């Protein structure tokens, strides 16, 4: 993703309802890693975890079994 001149990219949002885990040894992980265009800085991780907790503790949240 390369922005056109004068155009900025983002902001992006985390879709907590679409989070899934992928085994690092899998082929899917390797193919997804090649598509990565951004990473989360460690400074933002506590806020992201807080938002994730708020998503799962709200009424109507999916059952985690």
Image (cartoon, rainbow, N blue to C red):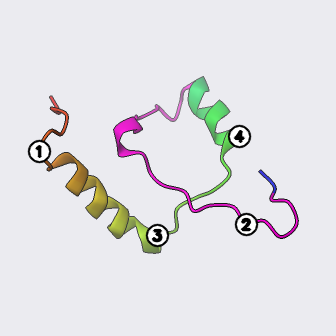
Spatial CA span between label 4 and label 1: 37 Å
Residues at circles 1 and 2 in contact by the CB criterion of under 8 Å = no
Where does label 2 land, which residue? 8
- Mark 3 or 4, nearer chain start: 4
Query: Nearer the viewer's eye, disc 4 or disc 2?
Result: 2
Q: Which residue occupies 46% across, 32% down?
A: 22
| Mark 4 in CB contact with mark 2 (< 8 angstroms) | no
Asked if marks 3 and 2 touch (Cβ < 8 Å), the reply is: no
Q: In terms of secondary structure, where does tag 3 sit?
A: helix
Q: Where is 19 relative to 3, above or below? A: above
Seen at 51% across and 35% down, the residue is 24
**Mark 1 element type:** loop
| Foreground pick, 22 / 25 | 22
Label 3 Cα neighbours within 10 Å, binned few <14 / some 14-19 / many ≥20: few
Crowdedness near tag 2: few (<14), some (14–19) or many (≥20) residues, C-alpha within 10 Å: few
Q: Is residue 16 left or right of residue 27?
A: left
Quick check: 42 left or right of 52?
Answer: right
Q: Which residue is mark 3?
A: 42
Residue carrying label 4 = 34
Quadrant of the image occupied by residue 16: top left
Local crowd size for mark 1, using a 10 Å CA cut-off: few (<14), some (14–19), many (≥20) = few
Foreground label between 3 and 2: 2
Tell me the element at label 4: helix
Q: Position of residue 51 (x, y in %)?
A: 29, 59
Q: Is residue 26 above or below residue 12?
A: above
Q: Which of the two discs, 1 and 3, sits closer to the camera?
A: 1
List the residue tagged with mark 1: 59
Image: magenta residue range: 3-26
- Asked which secondary structure carries label 2, the reply is loop
């Amino acid at each position: 993703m390369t922005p056109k001149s004068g155009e900025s990219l983002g902001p992006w949002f985390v879709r907590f309802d679409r989070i899934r885990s992928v085994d690092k040894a899998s082929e899917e992980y390797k193919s997804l890693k090649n598509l990565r265009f951004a990473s989360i800085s460690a400074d933002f991780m506590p806020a992201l975890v807080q938002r994730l907790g708020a998503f799962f503790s709200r009424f109507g949240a999916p059952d985690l079994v």
